[in-house]
């Protein structure tokens, strides 16, 4: 006996609620970004822009160097992702395949250390980067961001490495490959999806980080996007149409990324179970 | 281990220190294993361990960048004593605790609701999946700014919706209690989608046959939820709870974007107070003491998480 199929309208309603919850705030900001300042002053408020304008988008690029913010964010996220995935993949492989003693304990130590709260690291990192003259540089953010995503990347990669049959590597090694050769030629191509998944999660984590970016990159020209966005507000004024347009410019790249890679992102998130 | 032993006991004959059953090939592998673990630990040492030591040292110093002529003398526990009698520290701690108590269960309940709604046989999957992914992928600051706009007094969506149904507009961001509520709503919106994704994966592992059997036994939908869904989801819920708690203790971005701790200091979190103390007031010594107090709390919770994952491998996603 199977359960009666649910009424179609209920399924549709459920989908609508979840989608609306996720999309509505961004859509509202999108509508706002096309409105004029004058339209925003009128009450009652409008939903659709009455006379859509692109002026706000022009102001976004004129008022602040948002392309610089985008570039900084992209480079910092990309480079920290490469570092994080490389380091995590090495560690994960060692823990799964090579006979290091007490792999569980090592993994726990690695996770515990990497999960220290950023706010505690902020002050000494600020002092150190200041002493090393690294404030306002990419490495000041790349290194901590690589650690930020190390737990999720290591966990995702461990579960991928575990799924690869040992026999494949052994066969390659019998055929004359070294252990590293087997890792490079046999294991890595097979775990490419895992490496990729770990990479996306690390990229999004780095792209979103705010506290360290705010602290370690005080100069406007070296700010990342999340910090740069806060510069559109004046001391006492909040030009909402411009801020909205800036938010849209900032949201679009990451939305495209997750839209294209959504299945991998969901798989990685539920596998690593990390990040709030 | 073999490398440590070989440096400690160079006189011992090589055969003697090899464990029985560990062939030369195994020893090579083990050495390679250590080599591959080295970069991770090097990075952790530079970015976490050394800074933490530095933090603890600074917390025992008078270290104020605004008074460089004072130097950085050792002052013992003075900074910690100051924290104990600092009302703003206790208020910030209290606010942080409130955020944890409200937004962690809030995100789990809302996330569970979203997961149950999303766990349907949709033919087109992407709108629901993206609807859950988008809030997760947005930077927290963006969520803060968007909700600040929603809660804006005259043009904000929330007050205009209230006016439309005949209710008075509220001073969402300038009344201490309402500002706290508004911030909690923003945090729950932003964080519940991650919880929903984790719980949705959990829901999809529950075998259909359990529900079919319950149906035959005459159990209603509600009974099925309490007797099957919730117990089967328990591990996923625990993971989500712990992760949310660890991040909630560090709450910074959303209140920073929405109220910057105001009105007064009524929505200020511990992380925000630490940031202000060090970056705005340049008092590194006192800020470090506050940060040490905070990481002690965090460490206890992280240890709890690790104990849980070690006991239950499914929580690690294996």
Image (cartoon, coloured by chain):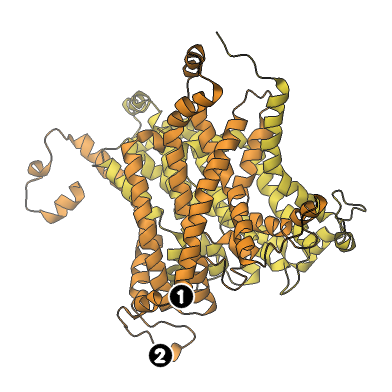
Res B87 label:
1
Comparing A113 with B144, the one in front is B144
Q: Earlier in the sequence, mark 2 or mark 1?
A: 2
Instruction: Supply the letter of whichever chain is yellow.
Output: A
- How far apart are the alpha carbons under marks 2 and 1? 26 Å
Point out residue B249 in the picture as x, y percentages from the top left corner. 46, 57
Q: Check the image and report above or below for B237 versus B57.
A: above
The tint chain B carries is orange
Point out residue A6 in the picture as x, y percentages from the top left corner. 65, 19
Judging from the image, mark 1 belongs to the subunit labelled B
Say left or right for B156 vs A120: right
Q: Check the image and report above or below for A77 versus B217.
A: below
Comparing B130 with A69, the one in front is B130
Q: Quick one: SS at disc 2?
A: helix
Point out residue B272 in the picture as x, y percentages from the top left corner. 52, 67
Image quarter in which the N terminus of chain A is found: top right
Res B70 label:
2
Residue A230 lies in what quarter of the image?
A: bottom right
Point out residue B251 in the picture as x, y percentages from the top left corner. 52, 59
């Amino acid at each position: 006996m199977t359960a009666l199929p649910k009424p179609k309208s209920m399924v549709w309603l459920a989908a609508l609620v979840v989608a609306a919850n996720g999309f509505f705030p961004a859509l509202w900001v999108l509508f706002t970004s096309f409105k004029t300042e004058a339209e925003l002053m009128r009450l009652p408020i409008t939903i659709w822009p009455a006379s859509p304008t692109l002026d706000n988008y022009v102001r976004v690029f004129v008022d602040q160097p948002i392309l610089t913010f985008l570039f900084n964010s992209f480079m910092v996220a990309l480079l920290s992702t490469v570092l994080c995935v490389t380091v995590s993949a090495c560690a994960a492989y060692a823990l799964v395949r090579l006979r290091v003693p007490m792999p569980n304990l090592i993994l726990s130590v690695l996770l515990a250390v990497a999960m220290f709260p950023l706010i505690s690291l902020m002050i000494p990192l600020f002092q150190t980067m200041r002493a090393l003259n690294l404030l306002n540089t990419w490495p000041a953010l790349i290194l901590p961001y690589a650690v930020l995503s190390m737990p999720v990347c290591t966990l995702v990669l461990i579960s991928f490495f575990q799924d690869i049959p040992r026999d494949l590597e052994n066969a390659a090694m019998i055929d004359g490959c070294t252990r590293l050769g087997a890792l490079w030629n046999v294991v890595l191509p097979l775990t490419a999806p895992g490496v990729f998944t770990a990479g996306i999660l690390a990229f999004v984590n780095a792209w979103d980080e705010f506290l360290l970016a705010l602290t370690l990159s005080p100069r406007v020209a070296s700010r990342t996007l999340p910090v740069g966005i806060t510069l559109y507000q004046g001391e006492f004024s909040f030009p909402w149409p411009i801020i909205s347009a800036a938010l849209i410019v900032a949201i679009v790249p990451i939305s495209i990324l997750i839209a294209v890679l959504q299945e991998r992102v969901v798989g990685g998130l539920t596998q690593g179970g990390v990040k709030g | 281990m073999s490398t440590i032993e070989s440096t400690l006991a160079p006189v011992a004959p090589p055969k003697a220190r090899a464990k029985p059953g560990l062939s030369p090939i195994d020893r090579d592998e083990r050495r390679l294993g250590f080599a591959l673990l080295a970069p991770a630990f090097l990075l952790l040492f530079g970015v976490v361990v050394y800074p933490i030591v530095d933090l603890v040292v600074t917390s025992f110093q008078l270290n104020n960048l605004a008074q460089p002529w004072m130097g950085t003398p050792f002052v013992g526990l003075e900074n910690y004593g100051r924290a104990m009698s600092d009302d703003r520290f206790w208020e910030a701690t209290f606010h942080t605790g409130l955020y944890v108590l409200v937004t962690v269960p809030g995100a789990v309940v809302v996330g569970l609701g979203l997961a149950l709604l999303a766990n349907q046989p949709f033919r087109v999957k992407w709108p629901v999946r993206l609807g859950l992914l988008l809030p997760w992928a947005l930077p927290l600051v963006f969520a803060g700014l968007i909700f600040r706009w929603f809660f804006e007094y005259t043009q904000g969506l929330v007050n205009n919706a209230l006016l439309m149904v005949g209710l008075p507009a509220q001073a969402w961001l300038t009344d201490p209690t309402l500002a706290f509520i508004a911030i909690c709503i923003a945090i729950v919106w932003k964080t519940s989608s991650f919880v929903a994704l984790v719980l949705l994966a959990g829901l999809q592992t529950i075998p259909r046959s359990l529900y079919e059997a319950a149906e035959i036994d005459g159990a209603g939908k509600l009974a099925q939820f309490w007797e099957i869904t919730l117990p089967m989801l328990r591990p996923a819920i625990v993971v989500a709870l712990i992760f949310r708690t660890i991040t909630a203790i560090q709450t910074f971005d959303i209140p920073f974007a929405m109220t910057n701790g105001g009105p007064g200091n009524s929505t200020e979190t511990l992380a925000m107070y630490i940031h202000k103390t060090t970056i705005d007031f340049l008092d590194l010594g006192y800020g470090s003491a506050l940060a040490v107090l905070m990481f002690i709390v965090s460490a206890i919770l992280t240890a709890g998480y690790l104990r849980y994952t070690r006991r239950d491998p499914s929580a690690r996603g294996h």
